[in-house]
Image (tube, rainbow, N blue to C red):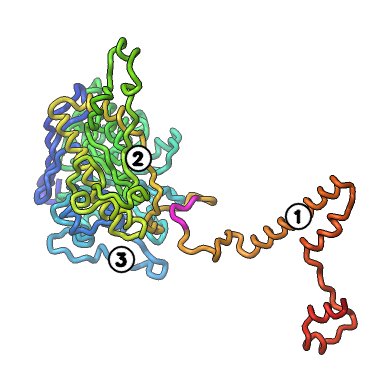
Amino acid sequence: MSSDGQQPTTTMTFELLKTAIKDGGARLGRLTFSGRRTVDTPNFFGLTSRGVIPHVTPDNVEKHLHTNGTYMALEDFIERPQQYMTRSPPIYETPSPVNKPLNSFTAMPSSIITVLGSRRLPAVCSPMGNTNQGISVFTSTGFQAVTTKEYINAVQTLNPDIAIPLADLTHKTNTPTSKRALRMAERTDDWIKEWFTEMYTKKDSKIATFAPVLPISYSMQWEYLERLSEEHASNPAVLSGLAVYDADLIPDISSSSSSSNKYKNLDPLPRLALTAPSNPHQVLRQLSLGMDIFLLPFLSTASDAGIALSFTFPPPPPPPNNPTSTSTSESAAAPESDLPLPLLPLGIDMSSPSHSVSLLPLTTNSCTCYACTTHHRAFVQHLLCAREMLGWTLLQIHNHAVVASFFAAIREALADGTFEEKARLFALRYEPEIPSGLGERPRARGYHFKSEGPNEVKKNKPAWSKFEGEGEGGEQGKEEKKEKTVEEKVDELRIQDEQSGTTSALASGVDSVAETPLVPDENADAKDLEEKGFAETVEEKK
């Protein structure tokens, strides 16, 4: 309760419209915030970098992007330079007439739902590690610690629509040990208790809380999940949704799959995927498990690589002369044209020279986005080759439109009961991964990535190189190459002498491949050397 004894209230509501599969699974829903766009689920939110969706200005987010929400990370805003360690980050000082400093600082349209978390997605692993008091974040000025108290104060100050409490995560690809996993659950449980106390018991907060579900086994965090269920049962306003880091845990916490239904209070809550799927196949799989809202890093990754996404749901029908299925008797005598179709690419590399004179839209699947209806492939290919930022902007607009159409078609399939069959056809028709792209990426700044160690391959070619194609070794490399060439020529002369049984080739040819050192005369006068030069003096003596 709040300090005046009233129940805290939030402005968010979530309604489950339909479950497509018995005992859980993919489902239709509707998420609403007062003053924001209504979000029909399944759907996706945009991922930001330092408060903006990469390559797209806030006005174009409102005008061209088909996204209803954005995810922002606190670590993008709280850098502290060494010379100003006591300075408060500018985002905390931003005036906001509507008490939404996060929206005011980032200029995000007021119709867009804002989600605030502690780390970027995907997050860079911190060498410092977490402590009982807080976590380590990666800012533009390096790693720094954020305590639970500081994070709660930041959330209350910035006032996002949705906030994700701190979770003790390793952000590593390998599975944590059982001891580390138990510590993750215990720390997160302690932090969530402090979160509920500070956010809703002492103050009447209208921020929707999406509690984290850790990427560890169910047996390690069942007590923590029980606490979430009990908190929601006693006061539904304190817990509005779940932020899931591992989609495979959804069946374990689903009330339909639990014998005691002890998590039945968590089942109707919206689920935000913090799993960072790398392609639409993974999206469909996680969606079939019951995920509602996705954050998709591959959107900006594809745009940076010059890839125009081209997949549709369901996949396009095969040509009439290439049926996808035949009976056993027919397949035995099937002609070559009736063999299984080649897989379709999930995207098209717009930096390829093959598009330099193409007047086709970015994709041929009737895309109605601004990029496809206004420009053509040749223009985008030119922009990418010239490294003009407009090229990546157009690709970002197009790729968001493709993913928005993808989720809209999924919702239609869930409504008419054809989702499972269409998802099966999608898996059979498209390649497993999005193309990596051969073009150069935009400049990657230090807070985007962290070096993983020596011999790391650079994504872009160096802006400057040695004159006339000299190698990385510079002058030293040229000398080594020259010495190697002399040795090779001497070896060739020695082989000729061995074959002829003489030493004439080596004796006569070594002077031509190796420079004879010039030794000054011991009686040489400095005045003579000054007048004629060292080389001329030696030649006269010869």
Task: State which tag comes first along the sequence, 3 or 1.
Answer: 3
Q: Start and end of the magenta stretch?
A: 457-461
**Res. 478 image quadrant:** bottom right
Q: Residue at x 14, y 39 (%)?
A: 40
Q: State which tag comes first along the sequence, 1 or 2.
A: 2
Point out residue 531 in the picture as x, y percentages from the top left corner. 78, 88
Disc 3/disc 2 C-alpha distance (Å):
41 Å
Q: Which residue is denoted by mark 1 in the rendering? A: 489
Q: Looking at the figure, which quarter contains the C terminus?
A: bottom right
Q: Is residue 189 visible?
A: no
Is the N terminus in the top left, top right, bottom left or bottom right quadrant? top left
Real-space Cα separation, disc 3 to disc 1, in angstroms: 68 Å
Amino acid on which disc 1 is placed: Lys
Q: Is residue 322 left or right of residue 142?
A: left
Q: Residue at x 84, y 55 (%)?
A: 506
Give the residue at mark 3.
88
Above/below status of 407 relative to 325: below
Mark 3: few, some, or many residues within 10 Å (few <14, many ≥20)? few
Indicate left or right for 197 with 128 as reference: left
Q: Which mark is residue 434?
A: 2
Q: Residue 361 at x, y = what percent?
A: 24, 47
